[in-house]
Amino acid sequence: MTHPRSASRRPRDAAGDVTLPVLNRRSLFALSAAGTLGLAGCGRERPLQGGWVGASHERGHAWRDGRLPRADAGSARHVDVAIVGAGVAGLSAARALRRAGIEDLRLFELEDHAGGNSRGHRMGGMACPLGAHYLPTPGPHAQAVSEWLFEIGVARHELGRTVYDERHLCHAPQERLFIGGQWQEGLLPLSGASADTLAQYRRFARTVRELQAAHPFRLPTALAPWTPGLAALDAEPFGQWLQSQGFGDPWLRGYLDYCCRDDYGAGLEQVSAWAGLHYFASRHGFHAPGEDDAQAERDAVLTWPQGNAWLTERLAAGLGERLQTGAVLTRVSPAREAVTLELWNATRQQPERWLAKQVVMCVPLFIAARLVDAPPAALRHAAAGLRYAPWLVSNLQLAEPLLDRLGVPPAWDNVVHGSATLGYVDAQHQSLRPVRGATVLTHYWALGGRSPEELKAQRQRLLAEPWQRWARAVIDELSLVHPDLPRKLERIDLMRYGHAMSIPVPGQRSHAALAALARPQGRLHFAHADLSGYSVFEEAFTWGAVAGARVAAGWR
Ligand SMILES: Cc1cc2nc3c(=O)[nH]c(=O)nc-3n(C[C@H](O)[C@H](O)[C@H](O)COP(=O)(O)OP(=O)(O)OC[C@H]3O[C@@H](n4cnc5c(N)ncnc54)[C@H](O)[C@@H]3O)c2cc1C
């Protein structure tokens, strides 16, 4: 899964419905239930080692179900600024406050580690991502992110140009697609593409360029003007918009569907036309074959073995005791003089009470709406409109490299044409070792769902089904292109996200409640990727930077 891709998979039928010629989730589970791995002749398979990692669902659910004891009203500690949630937005808010000289702050995080969706993991001594794994080199509007990358030495100026540290730029080959029995370079399906398909690719590229010229597609959208033209695109499902523009080619639509699932956790029938186009128009456009001159530089991606945890580790460094992990916020009560925060200290197994002058809420909005006493109308409305995508991230530790198949060699991002999942990235891709060896593959799966009910059902399955069943489904899928994988697999660790990211469904980005939450609500300030209606590093970082700077400005 990557942004700057050039490719995809899922052919669609003439009516525009997705067809899954290779595998879908149901067939994956059917395969597992029947125990048919299709691995004859591939050697001995090891007993499955692994389990769930990364998320303390029990803590969150204990709070949700009212099972955590409350602190006495008398004993409260004081702090100038409290930040709730230490994901990218919370860490960025802390950085902005400290840069402005505010040191009396406390960052409360439910998990035992900071980073939120951008945390990392380790297997067999190797770092790997638990969630977010790359950051495209920032464009001209992502100023806050860009400045910080200079500050930490990832970017520098050379002869008036911005140059990125080679160690962090994704090495070639960046991405490949398994199609027609072999690996092709890039993710846009080209192998066997008809003349009609190629013509649609070129026309879509032209359309994106025209829309880029006509509308302010910007990344981050956090600070961009929101115009009637963008709002009109936001009102319509992307699939419907494509149809109305004559983009009916199954390969083009399959690729665009992949891109939407990859960035938004939902397909092109679920997200808005604004979101589907923003994906390309806010970054580097859409590149049809033969039009990719100078693409290498424009499409550069920064990545690390542990994914974006490399970034959040740097953001968290130096916070010391200001960062309190294992702190489950249970209630946030704003009042005239101060805001009272109640939390459960999971390390000491006792409740705590804090009083803060200002609070930056950096948790997903559906959580904020439950935490805040008498939540403001904007928060209630925004939270009621949001839909969250469930995701499964599986880390597969391999004892040896996988056998090569025909076509381009192993890339960082590897996708199988026709799969319902999003493929895998190789955590050792950036390593400079001369010979390939043991590694960890991180497999991504946005479970999808066309309605709130379907999304809820997927979320419940994720919580209810044993890890072995999910692991088996992932292994079965990967075995179709890597039959040697099961016997090389040492262990599989799975991270389940019930509410991974908000889906930019039609009307979501234009919702007045989101715009209202971007402004202070008394002593409360909101900063989370949810405010943008979708989730990427640049949005979360910018919201944190804006909220931190605003709180600091009010202090002077
Ligand atoms: C599987 C996956 C892959 C992704 N890949 C990419 C990628 O490659 N590149 C990219 O740019 N983006 C990616 N994203 C998007 C990613 O969500 C953003 O990049 C970013 O990490 C969001 O940060 P945030 O601070 O807005 O939110 P979050 O990460 O949601 O942070 C919220 C924090 O609040 C904490 N919290 C929640 N409830 C409480 C409570 N009651 N008390 C205290 N703390 C609480 C949470 O534990 C969490 O740490 C991915 C997301 C997922 C799920």
Image (cartoon, rainbow, N blue to C red):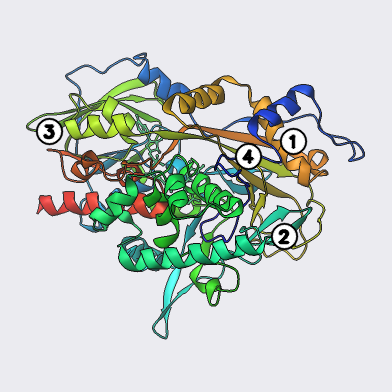
The residue that disc 1 covers is: 476
Give SS at disc 2: loop
What residue do we see at 56% from left, 57% from top?
304
SS class, disc 1: helix
Residue 316 visible somewhere in the drawing: no
Label 2 residue near ligand 1, CB within 8 Å: no
Please tell me how crowded label 2 is: few (under 14), some (14-19), or many (20+) other residues with Cα within 10 Å.
few
**Disc 2 from disc 4: Cα separation:** 18 Å
Task: Name the mark nearer the viewer: 2 or 3.
Answer: 2
Tell whether label 3 touches label 2 (CB within 8 Å).
no
The disc label shown at residue 19, or none? 4
Q: Amino acid at mark 4?
A: Thr
| Residue 257 pos. (x, y %) | 53, 47
Contact check, label 2 and label 1, Cβ < 8 Å: no
200 versus 118 height, above or below: below
Q: Is residue 493 visible?
A: yes
According to the picture, the residue beneath numbered tag 3 turns out to be 338
Residue with the mark numbered 2:
192
Q: Which mark is residue 65?
A: none
Residue 324: x and y, percent?
35, 37
Q: Are marks 4 and 1 in contact (CB under 8 Å)?
A: no
Within the image, what quadrant is residue 101 found in?
Answer: bottom left
